[in-house]
Image (cartoon, grey):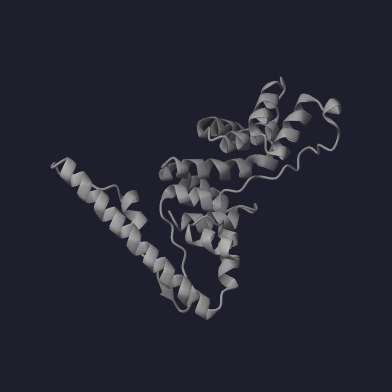
Amino acid sequence: MDELRNKYIQGKLSESERQAFEQNLTSEEKEELAYELGVRDEIVRKELRKKIAGFEEGNKRKRMINPTFISIAASIFLVASSVFYFTEVDESLFDQYYDLYPNYELTTTRSEEDLSNRGMAYAAYDAGDYEVAIEEFNKLDDLVAPDYFFRGVSYIQIKNLDAALADFNRVAEGEDVNYIDAALWYSALIHIKQGNKETAIPILQKLSKGRSEFALTSGELLAKL
């Protein structure tokens, strides 16, 4: 519980985990947590003021403070005995909503000797060895939409977002409807992480009007942009 509580305070829980955590809190626990978050918020504001003072001292020219940076100091309030979540920056939105996509495409129960390059790629993905997964996908001469998609997720895991976006765009523009919405969802998250909200918004709007598993979550994320 303490570990979960710390992750909540640090903003490291996914949206579903956050909601589940809040639902299990008593009124007293909510008040205590709100107080702790308020103290944390005040510390952040003090640090922000120090940094701004340092900027002004080092350069006397008029500066415009990045709104994203200022948002780190946003307040957290307790309203009607409910603790509302605090989103610090766009990058934290990515962290809140990003989840590793499970491999339903290819089971990898056979031994390594029996696996093809495609099988090896998915086995490495399942094992969390994303660099190897990418290497094995790259050996394929006939990549199909699922291969591009899972290679894209693997690229996210090694923080190569541009390569991931290229793979997701390829899937989204293709004809395999099984992965188009998922590719669009991950593309939107990457755009948000890279600070391109304007590009992410129409993607999320499209998803929110659809019937995929990402419809409700896309609408929720839109409201935070």
Query: Residue 151 location in percent, x, y?
Result: 64, 32
Location of residue 36 in the rendering, given as x and y in whole percent from the top left corner: 43, 69
**Image point (57%, 45%), residue name:** 185
15 sits to left or right of 126: left
State the image quarter where residue 176 is shown: top right
208 versus 36 height, above or below:
above
Q: Quadrant of residue 140?
A: top right
* Residue in the picture at 66% in, 23% down: 138
Numbered disc total: 0
Q: Nearer the viewer, residue 147 or 23?
A: 23
The residue lying at 43 percent from left, 49 percent from top is 90
Left or right of 225 in this view: 53: left
Answer whether residue 91 is visible to the viewer in this image. yes
The residue closer to the viewer here, 192 or 87, is 87
Quarter the N terminus occupies:
bottom right
* Residue 162 vertical placement versus 3 (above, below): above
Whether 181 is drawn above or below 166: the answer is: below
- Report x, y in % for residue 124: 72, 33
Mark yes or no: residue 76 visible.
no
Q: Is residue 185 left or right of residue 222?
A: right
Q: Is residue 197 left or right of residue 94?
A: left
Single out the residue that lies furthest toward the front. Answer: 2
Percent from the top left, x then y, of residue 114?
Answer: 86, 27
